[in-house]
Image (spheres, grey):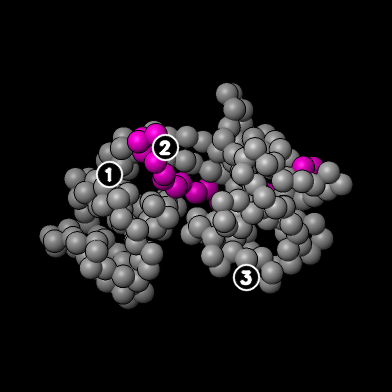
Amino acid sequence: MNLFINDTPVKFVKEDEPIDSSVFDAVIKSNSVINLSELTGNVLIDDVGAPQVRQMINQLVEEPFNDTRFVIRPHNYKEAKEDFMSLFKVMTAAGGVVQKEDKELLIYRLGKWDFPKGKLEKDESFKLAAVREVTEETGVKVVLGKKICTTWHTYTFRKKRILKQTKWYAMECINDQKMAPQEDESIEKVEWFTKSEAENALKHTYNSIKFVWECYLA
């Protein structure tokens, strides 16, 4: 589960998944006192129960951890995940990375370069929503390609905690003659970037979008 809480990368892994602890800057076991504020770098929190996971999630929601990435391996993955999900209202969305020859499409929204995406309509599939949202937000007509990844990210809206599941797809441009930003969605610019230009533009975007870009390149 590729999760971003307050834009902090948090990956939940199953209890039987093998992990090389040598790649982490810190390894915290279940019998340790967990103070997230003292941790930086790549951190493994291992063999923890649902109550400890809940405590950590509540801290992550309230505080930014800009220089930390967490991997959490609960001793009961299913229980911990269900308890975590109960803390949020879950919403679904879809989006895409659009390619035209040797360039990719980015949008500029709320001060950051991003990829087009949006919420599913009632009874709409992720694939249909991805194509519709990309076309609505950019004016570019596309054909759907392979799935890139799924991200989960949290935010607060009207004092409610939201957990958004977004499925991302690779897409091919078939017509960009009507390319234009959807201004009522706070999109200011829509532009084509070479991979090196996109890499530079995405240095200062959300961690979840950086993750999508990394998966797309892979």
Residue at horizontal 58 percent and vertical 32 percent from the top: 120
Say whether disc 2 or disc 1 marks the residue closer to the N-terminus.
1
Residue 214 at least partly seen:
no
Residue at horizontal 36 percent and vertical 35 percent from the top: 160
Report the amino acid beneath label 2.
Phe
Query: Horizontal and vertical percent for residue 182?
Result: 69, 41
Q: Nearer the viewer, mark 1 or mark 3?
A: 3
Q: Based on the displayed image, in which of its 4 quarters is residue 20 positioned?
A: bottom left
Residue that badge 2 annotates = 157
Residue 90's disc is none
Q: Is residue 139 left or right of residue 97?
A: right
Give the crowd class for mark 1: few <14, some 14-19, many >=20 residues within 10 Å.
many
Query: Horizontal and vertical percent for residue 176?
Result: 83, 48
Whether the magenta-drawn stretch holds residue 205 is answered as: no
Q: CA distance from mark 1 to mark 3?
A: 37 Å
Report the amino acid beneath label 1.
Ala
Residue 176 at least partly seen:
yes
Give the crowd class for mark 3: few <14, some 14-19, many >=20 residues within 10 Å.
few
Contact flag, marks 3 and 2 (Cβ < 8 Å): no
Report the amino acid beneath label 3.
Asn
Please state the extent of the stretch shown in magenta in the rendering. Answer: 139-161
Q: Nearer the viewer, mark 2 or mark 1?
A: 2
Q: CA distance from mark 2 to mark 1?
A: 24 Å
Q: Is residue 93 left or right of residue 193?
A: left
Query: Horizontal and vertical percent for residue 122?
Result: 57, 23
Q: CA distance from mark 3 to mark 2?
A: 30 Å
Contact flag, marks 1 and 3 (Cβ < 8 Å): no
Residue that badge 3 annotates = 200
Residue 80's disc is 1
Q: Secondary structure at mark 3?
A: helix
The secondary structure that dominates the magenta segment is strand
